[in-house]
Amino acid sequence: MGGAIDSSGYLRRLGAEREPPSLEGLRALHRAHAERVPYECLEIWLGRATTVEPGDSVRRILSGRGGYCFHLNGAFSALLLDLGYAVTRHVGGVQGNAGLPAGATGNHLVLTVSGLPSDESPDGEWLVDLGMGDGIYEPLPLVAGDYQQGPFRYRLSPSVVEPGGWRFDHDRRGGFLGMDFRGESTAMSAFAARHHELSTSPESGFVRVATVQRRDATGADLVRGLVLTRVGDGERQTTLERRDDYFAALADVFGMTLDDVGPAERDALWARLAAAHQQWLETVSPR
């Protein structure tokens, strides 16, 4: 499950206190994490390699950064284990659209927490997932049904492609169609090869589009390339055409001041982003 982590520093990052495991405590930690720790892949665009080791992910979170599912759910699982929660890691698969296959393809790490019964979840099982970007804000009871969180509506049901597993269907305005995960537990090492592929392959969405996302109680903020979008009761978009506007948005909207990124690295990052944005414009604009 990984070695010791700086749980005290992690809790300070979340603005939380150490408390015994409880459903309300889990909900509060999940909300704080969704709001304060961004879903992002900028390390790839900065040319920096990362691992799926939870300790490495925790250290990056403590530096003011985030990551994608292997990092965020990996780190959060380590924190919950340190706090005494019963956590299980599962192989999952995000289905981007209906043209792609459903199933636990290994491109996603999912968490469940057990031992917290309530009227919503009599058997005490909960879906915990901070690695879906604009996904859930609070844990969902692992019970089939429809769930409303802020402006978004989700559905949980038994997976039709993963026997014993589960299916999460996103809101129609979400950034992907849905996600399936297997019922059995797995180790973090199961994700190492897929992480390498997702962080290096030219076909990877993380390599093709630099994204930063953050969920809160009333919606989600997203940057894809240079387009900043707020999705909630409505939707509004802004193109960040200037270098200073882009880095200001990272700091003001997502809390990412990039203190560890020097001027030369920022220049190189902006050049890559601007070039990718121009290439995207050429594909969507009439000639």
Image (spheres, rainbow, N blue to C red):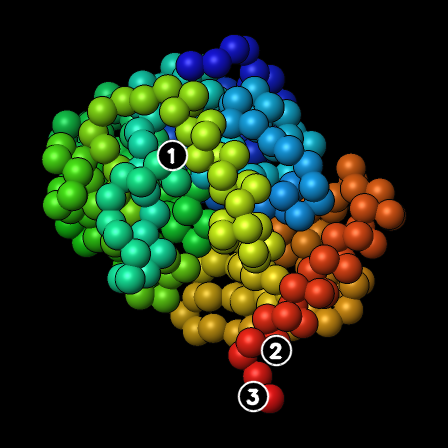
Residue in the picture at 46% in, 66% down = 231
Residue type beneath disc 1? Leu
Q: Position of residue 27 (x, y in %)?
A: 38, 36
Cα separation between marks 2 and 1: 35 Å
Quick one: 252 or 111, which is closer to the camera?
111
In the rendered structure, find residue 282 and report the number of the disc placed on it: 2
Residue in the picture at 32% in, 52% down = 95
Residue in the picture at 77% in, 69% down = 242
Nearest to N terminus: mark 2 or mark 1: 1
Quick one: 105 or 214, which is closer to the camera?
105
Q: Find out whether the residues at labels 1 and 3 contact each other: C-beta distance under 8 Å.
A: no
Residue picked out by circle 1: 109
Residue extending furthest bottom?
A: 287
Q: How many neighbours does mark 1 have within 10 angstroms: few (below 14), some (14-19), or many (20 or more)? A: many
Residue type beneath disc 3? Pro
Q: Position of residue 108 (x, y in %)?
A: 38, 39
Nearest to N terminus: mark 1 or mark 3: 1
Residue type beneath disc 2? Glu
